[in-house]
Amino acid sequence: MELALEQIILNPGQQLLLKKLNWQKFETILSELGESRACRLSYSHGVLEIMVPLPEHEKDKEIISYMVQFLLEELNINFEPLGSTTFTNKLMNQAVEPDACFYIQNYQAVIGKNRLNLAIDPPPDLVIEIDITSRTHLDNYRLLGVAELWRYTQSGLQINLLQEGQYIESLTSPNFPKIPIVELINQCVEQSQQLGRSEAIKNFKNWLRHNLDHN
């Protein structure tokens, strides 16, 4: 007897793995779950992972995404934020939904598009993943060709850059080369937990006001 998706209940922080799913079954599940859902998906070579984020996961995602967007605006850099868009590549048998992503160098390629196929469209220039309760599968993003991947864990921000087909850790971001982005994000997220989001963002903006012109 097969279980219907609506029969499965996942609480925040829980994950479900479904194995031996072909691409057609994956696309059927993706369609059944719809766009307005709390869970996030990752699919690779027949294995589908369904995860429901914890509240702290969402808080960290929102504040880091806001910081990136504000920085891009302050630096007068054109970009397109695509949030947790589902990225698929049928030829590579891969699909993933980042916590947040930004098209920066390739922003013009996605203007006006609501669905993206990475067999045709370029991958996002920057992806953000919050790994508080789960670990990002770097292979998904490596195979999809994402050049810069940020992972925020309980240890802080980790920047991964794609070089010669593999991710290497970096202390700096090519998208923000003269800004101590790891230090700023770690500090802001920590302050948001102690002082609240508004106060943390104020301190972040104050730092930019006093330092950005000198970078």
Image (tube, rainbow, N blue to C red):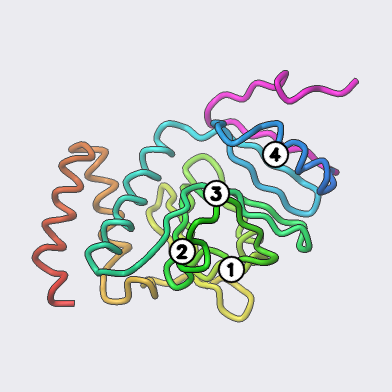
* Label of residue 30 in the image: 4
Mark 3 lies on a secondary structure that is loop
- Does residue 4 sit above or below 130 in this rendering? above
Classed neighbour count for the residue bearing mark 3: other residues with Cα under 10 Å, few (<14), some (14–19), many (≥20): some
Instruction: Identify which residue is drawn at 73% across, 43% down.
Output: 48
- The amino acid beneath tag 3 is Thr
Where is mark 2, residue-wise? 103
Where is mark 3, residue-wise? 85
Going from N to C along the chain, the mark reached first, 2 or 1, is: 2
As for residue 17 lying within the magenta part, the answer is: yes
- The amino acid beneath tag 4 is Leu
Classed neighbour count for the residue bearing mark 4: other residues with Cα under 10 Å, few (<14), some (14–19), many (≥20): few
Instruction: Identify which residue is drawn at 71% across, 31% down.
Output: 32
Q: In which quadrant is the C terminus drawn?
A: bottom left
- Does residue 117 sit above or below 1 in this rendering? below
* Label of residue 114 in the image: none
Q: Which residues are magenta?
A: 1-20
**Marks 2,1: beta carbons within 8 A:** yes
Going from N to C along the chain, the mark reached first, 3 or 2, is: 3
Mark 4 lies on a secondary structure that is helix
**Marks 1,3: beta carbons within 8 A:** no
Going from N to C along the chain, the mark reached first, 4 or 3, is: 4
**Marks 4,3: beta carbons within 8 A:** no
For the stretch drawn in magenta, what is the main secondary structure? loop
- Does residue 127 sit above or below 25 in this rendering? below
Classed neighbour count for the residue bearing mark 1: other residues with Cα under 10 Å, few (<14), some (14–19), many (≥20): some
| Observer-nearest of 30 and 199 | 30
Going from N to C along the chain, the mark reached first, 1 or 3, is: 3
* Label of residue 122 in the image: 1
Count of numbered labels shown in the rendering: 4
